[in-house]
Amino acid sequence: MASIPQDIRELFRQCHRRHPLDTPLTLQRLLAEESGRAVPLVAINFLLHEHVLKEAEGLYPTQWDDTLSHARERHEAWICDTLTLSPSHHLVATYAYDERTLELFWFVAHFPWDTEAAPRQMLRTFAALGVRPSRICCLPHPALLSMRDVFTAVIGDDLDRATASGSCMWVQPGNVRRHDYVGAEMKHLVFPIFATGPDPQDPKPVDLLLAKLLPGVDTVPSEILENRISGYMIAHAQAQLDILMRDWNTNLRHGAWANVGMFKMMRYGPPPTERRVSVAPNLC
């Protein structure tokens, strides 16, 4: 892909700056409409992934971050999943955790069509930890479509192309018990962020927040209002997810899993044990 003409690269850069969250197919259509050039989809995908990688240049640290040094030996396999935060506000959250320890590495709120959110967070995590996993397993979701190409590009210098591509794979729900366990727990933990009360007619917490932030909502133009609400939704969700991630990791480090209620043990089984970890490569 190094042979992509410079004028195509420049057209893509200008189009992507105006439409940073659009999908490759949408960008292809916009490029055709604005410039009259038929740019192959594979070239657009390559340029998108190149953009994500360039954004992370210069982030890699020269020394360990002491607050994250616990992750040094925990980078065999990472699991990446996406769950819905709010269908009405079109918000999802992508998170990744260590398959062995269940420790969360990131939890980011974004729009479902933002396929760069997960790879961008992955690169930032690599930079913060100074390590990368041997493989990444993604549960199927459109927001994770770019993960394989970006991860392959990152490790491509160390491995041949076929091996690198096989290091990022899709894994179906239900195939690995620990994935189902973590997924069920995450859905339970994020539910209050946009949940209603016992009565479906009760206002949602986020709607009460918006009422305070946008008192003159009736006087704001619709297109500006939509952008403001989207920004507030992301900020509100991310603040809650940051707290959730901190508490989750703190509980893990202090052995809080010993206090897991019996109803959880019956529903999901006990947390993964060292014995099950030994067969993880065959399960993922």
Image (spheres, rainbow, N blue to C red):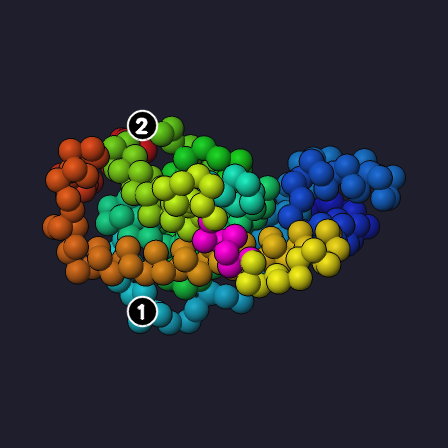
- Looking at the image, residue 137 sits to the left or right of residue 235; the answer is left
Residue at screen point 44% across, 39% down: 200
Numbered disc 1: secondary structure? helix
Say if residue 39 shows up in the picture. no
Q: Would you name the residue on which mark 2 appears? A: 174
Q: Main secondary structure of the magenta part?
A: helix
Judge by depth and name the residue closer to the eye, 102 or 43: 102
- Displayed quadrant of residue 221: bottom right
Q: Which mark is residue 51?
A: none
How far across and down, in percent of the image, does residue 64 sit?
34, 69
Mark 2 element type: loop
Nearest to N terminus: mark 1 or mark 2? 1
Give neighbour class at mark 1: few <14, some 14-19, many 20+ (Cα, 10 Å). few
Query: Quadrant location of the N terminus?
Result: top right
Q: Quadrant of the C terminus?
A: top left
Residue assigned mark 1: 67
Specify start and end residues of the magenta stretch as a single range: 204-210
Q: Amino acid at mark 1?
A: Thr
Foreground residue, 82 or 237? Answer: 237
Q: Nearer the viewer, mark 1 or mark 2?
A: 2
Looking at the picture, does residue 257 appear above or below residue 276?
A: below
Percent coordinates x, y for residue 72 in the rendering: 28, 59
Judged left or right of residue 191, residue 272 is left
